[in-house]
Amino acid sequence: MAKKFLMFCMSFLTILVVGACSNGDSEESGHGDMDHSEMNHSSSGEVPDGLQEASDPAYKTGDKAVLNTDHMAGMKGAEATIAGAYDTTVYSVSYTPESGGEKVTNHKWVIHEEIRSAGEQPFKPGEEVTLEADHMKGMKGAEAVIDSAEQTTVYMVDYTPAGGGEKVKNHKWVTEDELSP
């Protein structure tokens, strides 16, 4: 009986912690009201075809940096190890998941190579595209609108959440201005 009670308490606390981590502030989080549990925290490290390694990144593979963004709970203030640096156009996008659910606004980040039929020229804000990225459930194949576009270096990073927890490997993507030495 004590074991069942302990399991109940742990489940209840987990729900409270997860609920407290979502702030719903689309300008701050870069993910609108999305549920972070649907984000693929770690990935295989594979990069899309055509993505070019950065020729002179501020942070090189193996460098340490501090994350100054909160795409997901535990990112802000966490120490990261750079797993890869790539030159591309990075986009924030708004879309409705293919799997249904509420619209995701200002999702950061999708790169040019993760957009279906992306030619040589970058997309402009307001253009409609189809996503090939699968960072979140329902993202791949979703129709999206480009909110912002910037030619920059993006980084794939490994980090342990600032508050503790399981190490995240090959998180895609953070921009240079979201990192500090």
Image (tube, grey):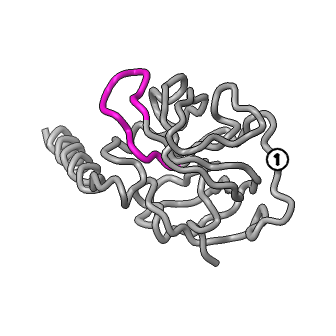
Identify residue for label 1. Answer: 52
Q: Residue furthest bottom?
A: 181
Q: Quadrant of the C terminus?
A: bottom right
Q: Quadrant of residue 51?
A: top right
Residue closest to the eye, 110 or 171: 110
Image location of residue 45, percent across then percent down:
70, 42
Residue closest to the eye, 129 or 179: 129
Residue closest to the eye, 105 or 85: 105
Above or below: residue 144 compared with residue 78: above
Image location of residue 82, percent across then percent down:
70, 61
Residue type, numbered disc 1 = Gln
Q: Quadrant of the N terminus?
A: top left
Instruction: Kindly state the secondary structure of the residue where label 1 is placed.
Output: strand
Residue closest to the eye, 31 or 125: 125
Q: Which residues are magenta?
A: 95-108
Q: Is residue 66 left or right of residue 83?
A: left
The residue lying at 44 percent from left, 60 percent from top is 70
Q: Is residue 71 left or right of residue 172?
A: left
Q: Magenta stretch: residue 101 in it? A: yes
Q: Is residue 156 left or right of residue 134?
A: right
The residue lying at 56 percent from left, 30 percent from top is 129
The residue lying at 62 percent from left, 56 percent from top is 158
Image location of residue 114, percent across then percent down:
65, 35
Q: Magenta stretch: residue 115 in it? A: no
Above or below: residue 34 compared with residue 65: above
Tag 1: Cα neighbours inside 10 Å, few (<14), some, or many (≥20)?
some
Image location of residue 157, percent across then percent down:
64, 56
Above or below: residue 120 compared with residue 18: above
Q: Quadrant of residue 113?
A: top right
